[in-house]
Amino acid sequence: MTKRKKGLENQVRRLAARQQAKQEQANQIIHFRLAAFVVAVVISGFAFFKWGATVWLPVTAVAFIPFIALVIWHRRVGTAVTRLSLYHAIKQTHLARLALDWDNLPPPLPAPERLEHPFAIDLDLVGARSLHHLLDTAVTQEGSTRLRDWLLETNPDPAAIAQRQALVAELTSQFRFRDRLALQAMLVSQSGRFSGQALTAWLAETTPASHYRRPLLVLTALAALNILLALLASATDLPDFSLITWPLYLGLYLLWGFRQSWSLLRDTLTLQDALETSQVIFGFLENNRYARTPHLQTLCALFQDQTTRPSQYIRRVRRLSTGVGAAQNPVLGFILNVFVPWNLFFVYQITRCRQDLAERLPLWLDVWYELETLNGLATFAWLNPDNTTFPTIEQTGSSLTTRQMGHPLVQSETRVTNDFAISQPGTVYIITGSNMAGKSTFLRTIGINLALAYAGGPVLAADMQTSLFRLFASIRVADSITDGFSFFYAEVRRLQQLLAALPVEETRPLLFLIDEIFRGTNNRERLIGSRAYIRALAESSGLGLIATHDLELVHLAEENGRIHNYHFRDDVADGHMVFDYKLHPGPCPTTNALKIMQLAGLPVGDELNR
């Protein structure tokens, strides 16, 4: 990680230097532009007064060429400054992810206030300073939401996991592709997260093209008849019957959609603008080469098809926009529509185009969203090359085996890893230990890495093999004033939900993670309730861990072979509490509450020395 960090820091410095140099160049060009403009004006004025209007026009055109060239140059340099600035921000964000510098990460999607989910809040998967916050590199709203949905999946599909792992593995080494995709997306949406929902909804509301087909055929036939009758009348002595058919044509035109056509014609500009904005991304995906990334090539196949790629539709819309623009002049537009159903023809063509795009655009956008989601997982793997691995997912069984597993939301400098294995249904690990020894963090470490594994991403471990579990956690339980729930009742409800989920007819076993069971009541009732609850868990088809301060619960292992004791240790050194954060077999031999109170200067009497 140190090597990766140093490399990113060097890139950030180089990009900052290049950005500053380009900005200075842009500032210099501004002065040159002003000078060139003043010189051109002087030359133009001199030519007008010296030689008159005949010579003035070509001289002026030539005199302004340097100014125009400088304007074009300045725009290109300005674009380079913008791109360097965004690229610099991307690299800085990578450094922030490495350092868990939450203040310098993009704001996360807000966590729902009332999220009825078996493990989302307990495992810090959503909201600020969460796993989703750390992984989310998406610029689009939909890409960010998709990553959150993957992390919160309660019924993961093994085939989808395998496919995502293959894609993430390919994308991990493609850091230039990932950063360039993010750069293009930021150019598209510099004011916030991009969302294609409004555009796809607008396309879906399109009036069917068949609605305009019959009126267009009738009016086209009438227009041809009008012109033919007018030509016959001018070439022969026949009466001009077009004086009868032309009013009929105009009446039908007004009746069948001439007025309604104007709103759709204005929509052409909206369609063109939206497509050309998206083409920044789509063009990048079209022009990229995927020879060394076969899984990525399959995902992006839509952008390689010459007949259905987005650029084909962009050109089609541009051609239609040219025809629509020709009729925007009031005089020309009136003449065109009087003789032929010009507007209605383009309304029909635009509607057909919108119908095609209503089918195609969601598919293109879906690939973009998928790539953004995969890129978040790949960036995590790339930033942690020495600490991550792709887990082996077993479709059957009820086992979890992992080596050197760590918590991704703990600083790498202070992170401690542990080995862990559990395999038999009904197995319950009672984890005891003192305050701050690492019990709750260890439970979350297991859960958060399983969420990563089931999302198709890498886990923070040297190795992991796991079955597909149904996760359930009771770690962070909160009361609810609005619903009238006390803390204890909220905890009871949570644990009742866990018990209810155990006997559900599922092929996948339930893995539970419980922290401080029944902490909201008195010692006597807590002990009685905890013993009964743990015994019930040990007789179920589920398996999991329970962290507790209550050392009386460790005796349950003596009566049931499915219950095992593990603990985290602590010590006092130089007047400070010291923890190794390593998981040890057996019950915890020490407690530290009174030690912490004494070190903080609180009165503990003589109890500590007894």
Image (spheres, grey):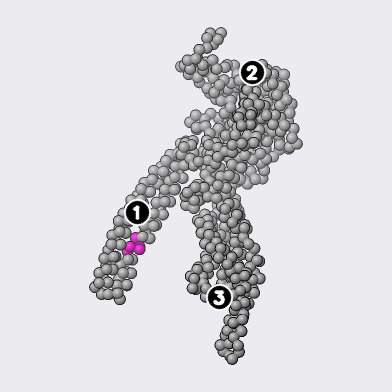
Residue 488 x/y as whole percent: 64, 25
589 lies above or below 147: above
**How busy is the neighbourhood of tag 3: few (under 14 within 10 Å), some, or many (20 plus)?**
some
- The reply to whether the C-beta atoms of the residues labelled 3 and 2 are less than 8 Å apart is no
Occupied quadrant, residue 65: bottom left
Residue 357 x/y as whole percent: 60, 60
Residue underneath mark 1: 26
Q: Amino acid at mark 2?
A: Asn
Residue 458 x/y as whole percent: 58, 40
**How busy is the neighbourhood of tag 2: few (under 14 within 10 Å), some, or many (20 plus)?**
few
132 lies above or below 522: below
The quarter of the picture where the C terminus appears is top right
Q: Which residues are magenta?
A: 66-70
Dominant secondary structure, magenta: helix
- Say which mark, if any, is on residue 338: 3
Sequence-wise first label, 1 or 3? 1
